[in-house]
Image (spheres, coloured by chain):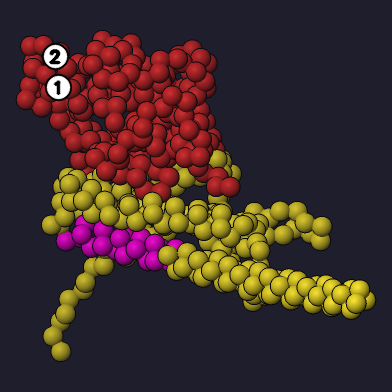
Amino acid sequence: MGNLGTRVSTSSVMYPYKRPSQIPEEFCNADDQPDSYYQNTWLVQRFLTSGIGTDNLFGKGNFLYVCLAALVELQLSTAPLNVPHFGMHGLQSQVILEYCGEWQLGTDGPLAVSADPSMIWARLRKDIEEQRTTLRWITRFFRKHFDHKNQNLQEAFDDIMERFKYRVQDLEQSESQLRDHLAAEGTIKSIQMAEMSIRESKRVMLCMFHSQSSLVYLLTALK
Amino acid sequence: MASGTHTRNPFPTKSHPPATPKAVTGFASYAEYLAKLGRSTVESSDHLSDDEMWLASFDRGGRCLEWNYWDPSKENSLDAPDNLPALDGNGVRPDMTILSSHGFRTVLQIPDENVAYRVVMVATGFDAIAPRTKDILGLGLDLGPEIFEYAQMCVENPYIGRHGALPRPWHKVSPALRIGQNALCILEAGSETASKTGIHNVPISHRYVS
């Protein structure tokens, strides 16, 4: 068997442990711990100075690719907060937010944050549209500012774009699920309304029957 | 960003690059500079702002040479500006130099032959980019107003309309790219800037998502 050579995967030399991550880290020195208020800024700073975009890796003139990578990685590491969680208890008027780390105080202890499904759907839809827009324009931005013929750079960009597309597809899946939830909820409400109107019409018919009977009695009595 | 002929317009143009990028230093504010160019002016009131900026400089090999930082809340306490000890734990690295607004703007304007790339990170505390931030960046890097309009669009709360605001810019023709709640703009090295510069906008107001 011939020597296939060692393929250097760009993603493996991308210092994945230095990618922006919202996971809390342990710091040896307490002074190094960034305030949560500055977490994103600090993550981007570290990404910029970790040597990911050095000319040795991506070729001359492509250093600022690290800026693009930093913001996309930051976006990928941030949980989408408008994704609903669907349990096994059927349709509910309020949906729980899957990735919302906050809890609200309930009478029986802390409860997961929940919200009106239609409101969550509107927010989720907005998030998806914004990310679709970024996806459409990011390739043009990349080609305009960087040497896309550089194989290492193109591989790194393809890797990050693939993950970005998967994220958008995940959001689209959640949006579709939520849309089905709203449609099912709408169908149930329609059925309930139909049943109610059937009951009402039966009641009206019954009343009419009684009044007609009374009328017959009245007429009979008059004779 | 500037237009017109060299004789009528003292500002840098593509066809007539200036000798140095200091062409806009004669203006006190970005609003004044835009007014001179005949562009729409930005608000000139110097209200309280929560904006912060970081500037990282890199050499040709991608090695970080220095970090600079500007925070308007420390502006008045800078008795000896441009060289105060850095703070801990609030996004300021130990090796950072804290600069006054004038110092930060000067660093942006003055070319350094050792610096090949620069990255400016702007964190906006309120929904609007403060006029002083626009002054520093606009005059320091000779930026066009559309970049601020675009960045503004990223940080604004879409549910709250700005009083008397113009229609939002059509961001698809903007030189910046929006990624999530952040925006990225890359300026080529040339007559306007001493070195290739990337600008991030990392809005503080969107760090916590409710």
The answer to whether residue B84 is seen in the rendering is yes
Q: Quadrant of residue B24?
A: top left
Q: Is residue A119 magenta?
A: no
**Element class at badge 2:** loop
| Colour red belongs to chain | B
Which mark identifies residue B9?
2
Chain designation of label 1? B
Q: Give the total number of marks visible in the rendering.
A: 2
Q: Which residue is tagged 1? A: B3
Q: Which residues are magenta?
A: A151-171
Q: Amino acid at mark 2?
A: Asn
In the image, residue A6 above or below residue A96: below
Nearest to the observer: residue A78 or residue B146: B146
Q: Residues within 10 Å of mark 2 (few under 14, many from 20)?
A: few
| Colour yellow belongs to chain | A
B69 lies left or right of B107? right
Q: Quadrant of the N terminus of chain B?
A: top left
Residue at image position (32%, 35%) is B169
Nearest to the observer: residue B114 or residue B131: B131
Q: Are circles 2 and 1 on residues that touch, CB within 8 Å?
A: yes
The answer to whether residue B51 is seen in the rendering is no
Residue at image position (16%, 61%) is A151
Mark 2–mark 1 Cα distance, whole angstroms, equals: 7 Å
Q: Residues within 10 Å of mark 1 (few under 14, many from 20)?
A: some
A65 lies left or right of A208? left
Nearest to the observer: residue A64 or residue B210: B210
Chain designation of label 2? B
